[in-house]
Amino acid sequence: MRGRTLAFVVFFYCGFFLLGGVSYAQSITVSLSGGSVQWNNGFGNALTPGNSTNAGSTSITISTIWSLAITSTRLRLYAYFNSSTAALAHGSLICTTGCPDIPSSAVELKINAGAFTPVTGTGPFGAAGASLILLNIAISGANRNSSNTSVLAFNINLSSLPQLPADTYSGTLSIQAQATP
């Protein structure tokens, strides 16, 4: 059986919203320690169809630094895909007909020591059913200018895909911050 290869590229975006016609100087900076997580024989972690535990080759450190206006009450950090049905799409010529993709519900993320959670939410970014809130921080005078550093770990749960064929699967997980209101 040929090995399954997965190139998983993580990009980040930064966004924030302002209220009304009054403009406040605000900034949010999101940076990542790396940009690629892989599952393949070269890393000793090839995808196993039907297996719920397929750990990524590495974790990524996300550093978020913010300076927000007095009107801001919450900072959220989202991870999302642009498709819930093909978060990781097959891409090689190995599979030519009836080729399944890996849905966002099979991609699981965890922050620090938390539990793995599938990317199945609906948020302001990405496709419906393909978003996950990574951080949800209440903003007050004490942390209006602050930062957070978290470690993001990856797992692909293929328990619902026991017949996933050998192929190359790839996709982009976007990371975006939002301050509200």
Image: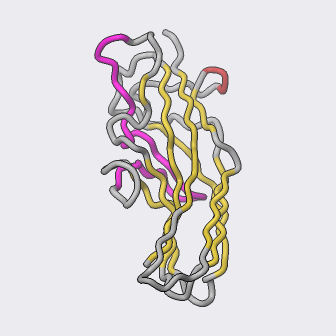
- Name, please, the residue furthest toward the front: 21
Query: Is residue 116 inside the magenta stretch?
Result: yes
Residue 172, given in percent of the width and then of the height, sits at 50, 39
The quadrant the C terminus occupies is bottom left
Please name the residue shown 60% across and 76% down the image: 26
Relative to residue 105, is residue 145 depicted above or below? below
Residue 63, given in percent of the width and then of the height, sits at 67, 61
What are the residue bounds of the magenta stretch? 96-121
Query: Is residue 103 inside the magenta stretch?
Result: yes
Relative to residue 108, is residue 54 depicted above or below? above
Please name the residue shown 59% across and 79% down the image: 68
Please name the residue shown 45% across and 21% down the image: 91
**Left or right: where 23 falls relative to 44:** left
**What is the quadrant of residue 88 in the picture?**
top left
Relative to residue 172, is residue 121 depicted above or below? below
Disc count in the image?
0
Q: Nearer the viewer, residue 30 or 45?
A: 30
Q: Nearer the viewer, residue 92 or 161?
A: 92
Please name the residue shown 51% across and 34% down the image: 54
Residue 154, given in percent of the width and then of the height, sits at 54, 44
